Image (cartoon, rainbow, N blue to C red):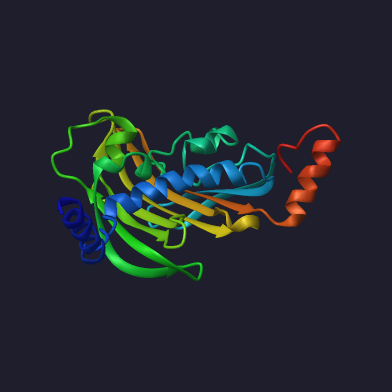
Amino acid sequence: MISALALSSAFLMGFTTPALALTPLQIAEKARDRDQENLRKYGATPCRLVEVKEELNEKGAVEEREEKTIQVAASSVPIPGGRETQRISPGMHAKNPKEDSSILDHLDLFDWKLEGEDESQGEPCYRLAFAPKKGVKTMSGRDAVMAQTSGHCWVAKRDFSRLRLEGRLKKPVEVMGFLVTVREVDFLTTTRRIAGGVAAPLQIRYRFRVEVFPFFEFHERHTQKFDFTSQAKSWASSKNQKGGVAGLK
């Protein structure tokens, strides 16, 4: 009798208890994990990377521009905006006070909110908003800048790939006392599906304005554009067969 009642209760609960929906934080966690999985997959694919560095004036107009093209070998392709980027372009990021994928590496620094559903690259997405969490202990350096960032993240509903991430610094942050102040930071990263449905980086763009008291201020915008087309693959493959991939073109 008891067993029959237990089975009956379990049967009813199975049909009357709704499945719990994912929280915004859980969606962000899945996006973080998918980032790493995608990296392992597209990291095995050579690509062509175009890097653009622009020096800006106070009004944001371009005063000086540099561009270079790099053929990136397999296993050296960076995760969008993240620490992995330094493997192929350390100099480009030397002055970068904020790397956007660290947002997903430090989810507990932010309050996450699901704003609803949206589209990115033609795909249905969860649109997440993130903002600095109150009560987080004081940090220093780049972490202090990251902790004062807010923005949005578009996560694909089908596999939780991060398709778009954008944000900006909410207020100036002093990173070395009063000597260095990060005045402005904004960034945008986008991805596109490549072979196998993997979400690989398409473009990374970030701008920052930093004041070094009392000497100078630098205001720059950096852009990285990725090409995983068959042409880029065949080019890198031929270079590998001839003894390595070229650095600059």
Q: How many marks?
A: 0
Judge whether residue 71 can be spotted in this image.
Answer: yes
Residue 147, relative to residue 9: is it above or below? above
Residue 213, relative to residue 109: is it above or below? above
Residue at 55% x, 43% y: name it: 39
Give the image location of residue 205, x and y in percent: 48, 52
**In front: 173, or 232?**
232
Q: Residue furthest right?
A: 242
Residue 124, relative to residue 47: is it above or below? below
Q: Quadrant of residue 134?
A: top left
Q: Quadrant of the N terminus?
A: bottom left
Residue 98, relative to residue 150: is it above or below? above
Residue at 34% x, 69% y: name it: 117
Is 201 situated left or right of 227 in this image? left
Give the image location of residue 130, x and y in percent: 27, 53
Judge whether residue 220 can be spotted in this image.
Answer: no
Give the image location of residue 126, x and y in percent: 36, 63
Give the image location of residue 36, x and y in percent: 49, 42
Q: Quadrant of the C terminus?
A: top right
**In front: 62, or 246?**
246
**In front: 20, or 173?**
20
Residue at 39% x, 49% y: name it: 30
Is 241 situated left or right of 47 in this image? right
